[in-house]
Image (cartoon, rainbow, N blue to C red):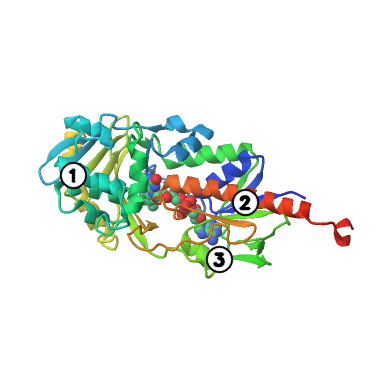
C-alpha cells in the first residue's frame, strides 16, 4: 500500500514540510483552502497589470534554513540585497537621511551607526541580546534616542509587536543570529514572493510528483484511537492508509478548531501595506522611516510598497485616508532618491490589510501545543517554537514536522517488528 504524507496548508510551513518529506524519498500531497498557494507570502495578480505582493517580506542572511530552502529550489540568486551600503533611514521630522548598518559590527564605522547611539546604549543592547528573563523590549532600553532610531523599528519589523509589549527573549533569539559576521544583510525578492519563492518551490515539488490541490479546505479530521484516519475536505473525504501521516501547517485558530482543547496562541497583530503604482529604479531600493506612520518602503521598478507593522492604531481606519497620509509622508524621501513624486499627485493605490498577520509576540505566556498531538499527525506553522514568527520559523517548523513523523514511523515500525508474533499477525 502507498505510504503518504498529507499536508494541509500550502503556506511556507506546508511547502517546507512537503520539500522535506519528498527530499527523503517520501510521497506527499498538499491541500490548500485558498485558490492560490503561498498563504501569507503571496503575490496578488490583477487583470490591469498592477501586480504586487500582499506585503513586503524581507529576509536576513542570518535566516540560514530559508536560504537553504531557496538553494534547494534553485531560487537563492533571486533574493538580492537592495542596500549593501547600509539601510537608508529617512526621518520625517527633520528631513534627514542617514545610512544605518543592521549588524552591530557595521557600527564600527561612524557613518553606519544608528542616530543617537552612545556607549551606555551598547550595554543596554547587550542586555537585550542576552536577557536574564523575559520582559518588554522597551523596559531594557528605556527612554533613549536609539529607541526611536533603531530598537522600535527593529522590534516591530521582527516581532510585529510594539517594543513596549514585545518579548525581549523572542527578539533576543533573532538578535543573537544577527551577531554573526555577515548575518545582518537584508534581502528582498527581486521580482516578488510568488515568482521568487512560491513558484520555484511548487516547480521542485512537481518534479518530485507532489501535487498541491487548491480550493480544498480541511473541514474536519476523522480520528480513532489517537490516530488521524481521514480528512473531510471541501469536495472529498480522504481516508488514510495505516501508514499515512498528516501535517497540519495551519494558523493556530484552525488547529484549535480541528483539534479542540489544544493550547494555541489567541492574540494577533495586524500589518497594513500600501502599494503605489509608479515608475521606480531598475533594481529595488529599500528605505526605513522614523517619525512617520510609514515604517519601510520597498521601491520596485513599477511600484512602491509601504509597510506599517503592529498596525493596530490604523487597521480599522478608512483605507483611502491612511494611504493619502502615507503618500504625503514618503514623497520627500522618494524625491531625494530621484523619483518623480509630488504630494498632490498620488498614483493609483492599493491597500492590503492583514488583520492576523502574525501572532502577538508579547512578554507574556504564549500557549504552545504538543508538536505531535496524534500518533501520525504533526503540527507546523510560523507560530510554533521560540523564534519570531517569520518565514524562517515557518521553514523550520515544516522541516521539524517532517522529521517528527519520520521518527514516529521508525518507532512504530520497530515496535511492530519487536512485538512477539501472534496468530492474527501470521494470518
Ligand atoms: C504583510 C506581512 C508581512 C510580513 N513580513 C515578513 C517579513 O518581512 N519577513 C518574514 O520572515 N516574515 C514576514 N511575515 C510573516 C510570514 O509571512 C509568515 O511567517 C509565513 O508566511 C507563515 O507561513 P505559514 O505557512 O506558517 O502560515 P500561512 O502562510 O498562514 O499558511 C497557512 C495556509 O493554510 C491555509 N489554510 C488555512 N486553513 C485551512 C484549512 N482548514 N484547510 C486547508 N488550508 C487551510 C491558508 O490558506 C494558508 O495558505 C509577514 C507576514 C505578513 C502578513
| Residue depth check, mark 1 versus mark 2: number of the one nearer the observer | 1
Using the rendered view, name the quadrant where residue 186 is placed: top left
User: Label 1, on which residue?
Assistant: 121
**Residue 10 seen:** yes
User: Label 2, on which residue?
Assistant: 405
Find the residue positioned furthest to the front.
132
**Apparent side of residue 67 relative to residue 122 in the rendered image (left or right):** right
Local SS, label 3: helix
Point out the tag, 3 or 1, that comes first from the N-terminus: 1
Dots 3, 1 in contact, CB < 8 A = no
User: Label 3, on which residue?
Assistant: 258
**Apparent side of residue 392 relative to residue 108 in the rendered image (left or right):** right
Point out the tag, 1 or 2, that comes first from the N-terminus: 1
Using the rendered view, name the quadrant where residue 25 is placed: top right
- Rendered view: 190 above or below 213: above
Point out the tag, 3 or 2, that comes first from the N-terminus: 3
**Apparent side of residue 227 relative to residue 368 in the rendered image (left or right):** right
Mark 3 sits near ligand 1, with its Cβ under 8 Å away: yes
Q: Determine the residue positioned at 27% across, 42% down.
A: 297
Counting other residues with Cα less than 10 Å from the Cα at mark 3, is it few (<14), some (14-19), or many (20 or more)? Answer: some
Amino acid at each position: 500500500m502507498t505510504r503518504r504524507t498529507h499536508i494541509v496548508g500550502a503556506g511556507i510551513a506546508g511547502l517546507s514540510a512537503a520539500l522535506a518529506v519528498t527530499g527523503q524519498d517520501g510521497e506527499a500531497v498538499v491541500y490548500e483552502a485558498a485558490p492560490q498557494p503561498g498563504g501569507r507570502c503571496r503575490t496578488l495578480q490583477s487583470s490591469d497589470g498592477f501586480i504586487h505582493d500582499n506585503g513586503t517580506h524581507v529576509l536576513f542572511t542570518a535566516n540560514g534554513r530559508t536560504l537553504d530552502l531557496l538553494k534547494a529550489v534553485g531560487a537563492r540568486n533571486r533574493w538580492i540585497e537592495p542596500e549593501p551600503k547600509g539601510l537608508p533611514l529617512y526621518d520625517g521630522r527633520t528631513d534627514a537621511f542617514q545610512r544605518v548598518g543592521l549588524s552591530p559590527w557595521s557600527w564600527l564605522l561612524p557613518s553606519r551607526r544608528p542616530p543617537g547611539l552612545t556607549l551606555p546604549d551598547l550595554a543596554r543592547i547587550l542586555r537585550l541580546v542576552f536577557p536574564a528573563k523575559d520582559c518588554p523590549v522597551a523596559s531594557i532600553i528605556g527612554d533613549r534616542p536609539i529607541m526611536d532610531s533603531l530598537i522600535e523599528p527593529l522590534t516591530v519589523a521582527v516581532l510585529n509587536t510594539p517594543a513596549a509589549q514585545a518579548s525581549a527573549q523572542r527578539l533576543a533569539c533573532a538578535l543573537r543570529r544577527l551577531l554573526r559576521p555577515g548575518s545582518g544583510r537584508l534581502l528582498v525578492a527581486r521580482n516578488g514572493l510568488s515568482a521568487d519563492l512560491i513558484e520555484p518551490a511548487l516547480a521542485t515539488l512537481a518534479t518530485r510528483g507532489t501535487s498541491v490541490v487548491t480550493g480544498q479546505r480541511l473541514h474536519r479530521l476523522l480520528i480513532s484511537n489517537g490516530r488521524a484516519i481521514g480528512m473531510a475536505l471541501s469536495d472529498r473525504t480522504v481516508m488514510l492508509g495505516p501508514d499515512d501521516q498528516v501535517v497540519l501547517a495551519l494558523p493556530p485558530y484552525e488547529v484549535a478548531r480541528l483539534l479542540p482543547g489544544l493550547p494555541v496562541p489567541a492574540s494577533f497583530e495586524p500589518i497594513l501595506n500600501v502599494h503605489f503604482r509608479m515608475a521606480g529604479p531598475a533594481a529595488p531600493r529599500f528605505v526605513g522611516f522614523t517619525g512617520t506612520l510609514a515604517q519601510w518602503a520597498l521601491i520596485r521598478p513599477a511600484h512602491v510598497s509601504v509597510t506599517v507593522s503592529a498596525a493596530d492604531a490604523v487597521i480599522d481606519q478608512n483605507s483611502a485616508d491612511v494611504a493619502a497620509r502615507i503618500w504625503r509622508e514618503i514623497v520627500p524621501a522618494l524625491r531625494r532618491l530621484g523619483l518623480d513624486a509630488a504630494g498632490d499627485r498620488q498614483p493609483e493605490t492599493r491597500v492590503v490589510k492583514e488583520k492576523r498577520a502574525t501572532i502577538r509576540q508579547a512578554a507574556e505566556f504564549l500557549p504552545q501545543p504538543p508538536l505531535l498531538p496524534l500518533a501520525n499527525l504533526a503540527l507546523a506553522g510560523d507560530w510554533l517554537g521560540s523564534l519570531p514568527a517569520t518565514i524562517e520559523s515557518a521553514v523550520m517548523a515544516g522541516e521539524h514536522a517532517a522529521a517528527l513523523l519520520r521518527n514516529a514511523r521508525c518507532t512504530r515500525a520497530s515496535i511492530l517488528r519487536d512485538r512477539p508474533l501472534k496468530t492474527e499477525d501470521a494470518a
